[in-house]
Image (cartoon, rainbow, N blue to C red):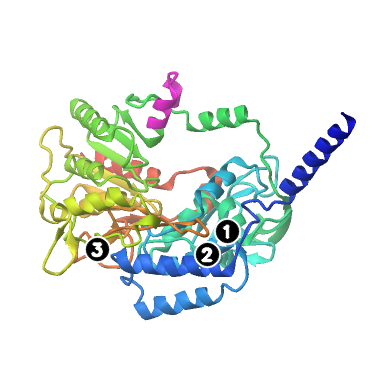
Amino acid sequence: MKKGAVVCCLILFACFICNAQKPGLFTKKIAPEKMRADMDLLKKILEANHPSLYWYTSKDSLDDLYHQVYNSLNDSLTELQFRYKAGSWVTAIKCGHTSVRVSKNLSKELAKNNLPQFPLQIKAWEDSMVVFGNAFRNDSILKRGTIITAINGLSTQKIRDSVFKIISTDGNSINHKNQVLSNSFPYWYNSVIGNDSVYRIHYYDSTGKVQTSLVNNYVAIKTPKQAKNQNINQTARPKPDSVFTNQSPVAQAPKMSKHQMKQLSRRSLSIDTANLTAIMRLNTFSRGALKLFFRRSFRLMKELEIKHLVIDLRSNGGGKVDNSTRLTQYLINRSFKIGDTVVAISRKFEYSRYIHPSFIYWVAMNFGGRKMEDGKIHYRRYEKHLFEPKEKNHFNGNLYLLQGGSSFSAATMFIAALKGQSNVKVIGEETGGGYYGNSAMHIPTIVLPNSNIRVGLPMYRLVMDKNRPKGGGIIPDISIPPSSLAIKAGIDLKMNMVRDLISKESNNK
């Protein structure tokens, strides 16, 4: 009995040692030949199916960069390191929907592990980086609004350049990259630059002199219940279809289900009857029962004789085209179509085993697309069908559209259709999505077999209007860049501009 117990203990101890020494997903290395095989496969798939591979970058330039990356794969790398290598090539395509993501397994590990992370939330734009939040709330130096110039000896420009190599965008729209970096600065810093136990932050003090402050790594220690409650509190908002008149929505917020809170995080409507103004916030064009939400919202605005409508799309990364089209119909004053051309180079999936879900998209492209004389597959409905403005509950008042670097894909399509209309003002920063067009519509995912990293594969090239400038996002009618002073004071400059415009409009009548 004693011998048996000893043997069992030895076996358990050996298993423990093996598991302790077994490399995790963060440190597990991929052999060079496997990474080269993945790169070779990725190039073949993109050449076979991507509709805009050489839209912004010539084939010679893209091939040269590919060979540089391919030939640099001489040593074993972790998944994050290989993702950076592959991403530096994919980003050169300049397609916002062709982005490189880590594998599903690593993504889950990143989500569930309380890993040490960079403690500051940073807002980045042009040549500026400003503290937006600090995990150490008692820090009296690195407060909201503090301008930083370097981290651990790396200038803010160096950090931006390093991260931007793997953030995809439409054409040359740098503002989207700035916004993506700002949305998750600790993640991008840790993924690209790497973790440190202590960070030396160079910043401007109140006199304009550069000073230095040390800040430790941050580890969030939460029980599962605490994490769950925190997530609920962060997304808690008023009831989805409620309309709040002349009061703060939060003050009247009733108790809501998780479903209602999710809906409110996607879209909301508030109305100020005193100023006959409605504010609609749309963070997506995908979920949220949007067609029903639009129908109820515009019916109510008609009943209340609303004269000013603000639609905030600054956090809207896109979604379903039919939802953005329906909203456009309530606002536009002419017939319109989705694009001048919507084309794919192929509807065959030669490498279908690595494209998910290939069968669903094969069916969609074979029944929804039509091969034309140019040899390409055209989405004829979006090229030819004219969508008419909705007559019932159509809004004809003053329309203010708020946009920014996160306004992407279907959100950009929506804004582009309305820009230039006499009653429309576009306010904010350049959109992340292209004004001329993009590659999207159907977007399956490439999963590379050795590394399991994922790459988006848009199937159609959309040219919304061939007469628009190519290469950038939508430039607003009234440009309002970020400001360190506004961040420090917690002021929304874009919304303040809208309120001023509405006030002037009301006073002129």
Question: Closer to the camera, 291 or 354?
Answer: 354
In the rendered image, residue 153, in percent from the top left (x then y), is placed at: 69, 66
Q: Which mark is residue 346?
A: 3
Q: Which residue range is magenta in the image?
A: 248-263
Crowd band around label 1 with a 10 angstrom C-alpha radius: few (<14), some (14–19), many (20+): many
The residue wearing badge 2 is 127
Q: Earlier in the sequence, mark 1 or mark 2?
A: 1
Amino acid type assigned to the residue bearing label 1 in the image:
Leu
- Residue 20 % position (x, y): 74, 47
- Nearest to the observer: residue 454 or residue 154: 454
Where is residue 56 shown, x and y percent of the image? 33, 71
Q: Which residue is mark 1?
A: 80
Q: Furthest-right residue in view?
A: 2
Q: Is residue 262 magenta?
A: yes
Q: SS at mark 3?
A: loop
Q: Residue at x 35, y 38 (%)?
A: 281
Q: Compared to 210, does 257 lie above or below?
A: above
Label 2 – label 3 distance at C-alpha: 41 Å
Instruction: Name which residue type carries label 3.
Output: Ser
User: Which image quadrant for residue 504?
Assistant: top left
The vertical placement of 30 against 499, above or below, is: below
Specify whether residue 283 is in view: yes
